[in-house]
Amino acid sequence: MAQQLDTRAEGLHIGFIMDGNGRWAKKRGLPRNAGHRKGAQVFQDITRYCNELGVASASFYAFSTENWKRPAAEVAGIMGLFKDYLVKAFDYKKENNRVCFLGDRTPLAKDLQELMAEIEEGSRQNTGMILNVAINYGGRDELVHAVRSIAGQVREGGLLPEQIDEQLISDRLYTAGQKDPDFILRPSGEMRLSNFLLWQCAYSEFIYMDVLWPDFTRHHLDLALDEYNHRSRRFGGI
Ligand code: IPE
Ligand code: IPE
Ligand code: MG
């Protein structure tokens, strides 16, 4: 199967909505942050597996613009984890990933923002997989930022409204220059997008799986890839 996936996975962009950490913890009588901790380990293993499979880009939804509604202790736990585990654990030199953070980072702690900038800068020349981590990301928020930036340019006289096209909008998103996701995988049994990559998902395939993210394994990704490989994508054609 791996050999078949290697070729089929060429140029592939997969989006992961890492969901179900809280339910995983609750089932075990653990605090929700224990689920986030386990979820972060799974994240690392799955990024490695994507790399091994030759996946071109992988985008992981880690924290949404709506997740600030959660109790402060949970938000602090996720941010702490992001800093201690996700950010420091990105061995971007060894793994050769080009790391990009998607989302509005201005409300994040200054030291976190610095680490993120350092990782992006330090991994810019890497030639392996593009690893997008969406943190304080919302598809609508992303579009608001893009519209503001375009409107500002129009006001200054640098752009005519007629010059605004799909490409220009794509170029103002956090994913500027990147290929749209081929498929979005959401574990946890929920069947919704929850504000993830709204513009970019116009023709993405959706794969929902009844497994909580902390229980997600390489085998689940094999199953999802297999399902994706059987989908017929038409992009409006016949
Ligand atoms: C996903 O797991 C992680 C984040 C949204 C930060 P959840 O925390 O949403 O887990 P459930 O959906 O409550 O089980
Ligand atoms: C989506 O999960 C956000 C992330 C996985 C980061 P949520 O748990 O926040 O989504 P809803 O609230 O179930 O739609
Ligand atoms: Mg959830």
Image: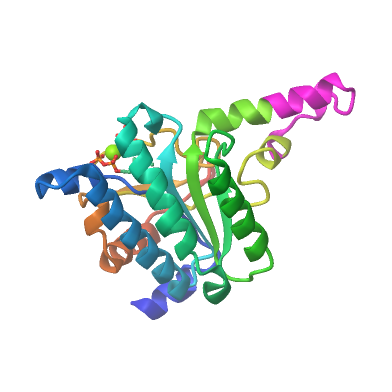
* Residue 168 percent coordinates (x, y): 73, 37
Residue 114 lies left or right of residue 225; in this view the side is: right
In the image shown, does 147 or 182 lie closer to the viewer? 147
In percent of the image, x 30 and y 45: which residue is there?
Answer: 19
User: In which quadrant of this rendering is ligand 2 seen?
Assistant: top left
Q: Nearer the viewer, residue 104 or 77?
A: 77
Q: Quadrant of residue 125?
A: bottom right
Q: Is residue 231 above or below residue 7?
A: above
> Visible in this render: residue 64?
yes
> Which residue is most to the bottom?
3
- Residue 70 percent location from the top left of the image: 32, 30
Q: Residue drawn 40% across and 76% down?
A: 4
Horizontally, residue 157 falls left or right of residue 237, namely right
> Which residue lies most toward the top here?
155
Pick the residue in front: 108 or 194. 108
Residue 164 on the magenta segment: yes
Q: Is residue 7 magenta?
A: no
Residue interval drawn in magenta: 148-167
Q: Quadrant of the N terminus?
A: bottom left
In the rendered image, residue 93, in percent from the top left (x then y), is placed at 58, 73
Q: Is residue 97 left or right of residue 68?
A: right
Q: Nearer the viewer, residue 9 or 57?
A: 57
Magenta stretch: helix, strand or loop mostly = helix
Using the rendered image of the protein, determine whether residue 209 is visible from the camera's viewpoint. Answer: no
Look at the picture and state if 216 lies above or below 163. Answer: below
Residue drawn at the location 51% of the way across and 61% of the way down:
12
Could you tell me residue 171's position as x and y percent?
A: 70, 42
